[in-house]
Image (cartoon, rainbow, N blue to C red):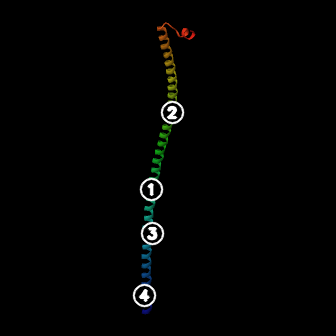
Amino acid sequence: RESVGDSSGQLLATVQRMTREQLEAAREEVSRAYEIAKSREKEAQDAREKVESLQQSHAVLKATMDQLRERVDDTKRHAETRTEAASRHKATSRNLRKQLAEVHAALANAQAELRLSRRGETRDTRDSG
């Protein structure tokens, strides 16, 4: 009988030891799984922060691009206005040069008439005579 008791005691001790080992292995596995989950949660948080940072950078870049486009449009409009003004000024300058040439011609005619009148002639009498 004692050998049956001894062997059931040994069997019980073996079962208890195996149970402790399995419990310890399960605890270690749970601990590793918790650490992995914690690590992945940290990675996910880092990824969310990077996405938010990229979204903010994108918004800033978009606003900057919009401002640059607006400045380019303003510059184009200004250049068109300046081009139109330059064309007007060029036309005005041509007109003024033409008027100046006409005034010079009229002045030259007046001076010629004055010289002739000092001599007692007029252009009409000189041309006919």
Residue occupied by mark 2: 83
**Nearer the observer, disc 1 or disc 2?**
2
Farthest front residue in view = 129
> In the rendered structure, which amino acid carries the disc numbered 2?
Thr
* Distance from Cα at disc 4 to Cα at disc 2: 106 Å
Residue 56 in the image, given as x and y percentages of width and height: 45, 50
Sequence-first disc among 2 and 3: 3
> In the rendered structure, which amino acid carries the disc numbered 4?
Gln
Sequence-first disc among 3 and 1: 3
Q: Secondary structure at mark 3?
A: helix
Sequence-first disc among 4 and 1: 4
The residue closer to the viewer here, 128 or 36, is 128
Q: Are marks 4 and 2 in contact (CB under 8 Å)?
A: no
Q: Secondary structure at mark 2?
A: helix
> In the rendered structure, which amino acid carries the disc numbered 1?
Lys
Farthest right residue in view = 128
* Distance from Cα at disc 4 to Cα at disc 3: 34 Å
Residue occupied by mark 3: 33
Residue occupied by mark 4: 10
Sequence-first disc among 4 and 2: 4
Q: Secondary structure at mark 4?
A: helix
Sequence-first disc among 4 and 3: 4
* Distance from Cα at disc 4 to Cα at disc 1: 59 Å
The residue closer to the viewer here, 77 or 125, is 125
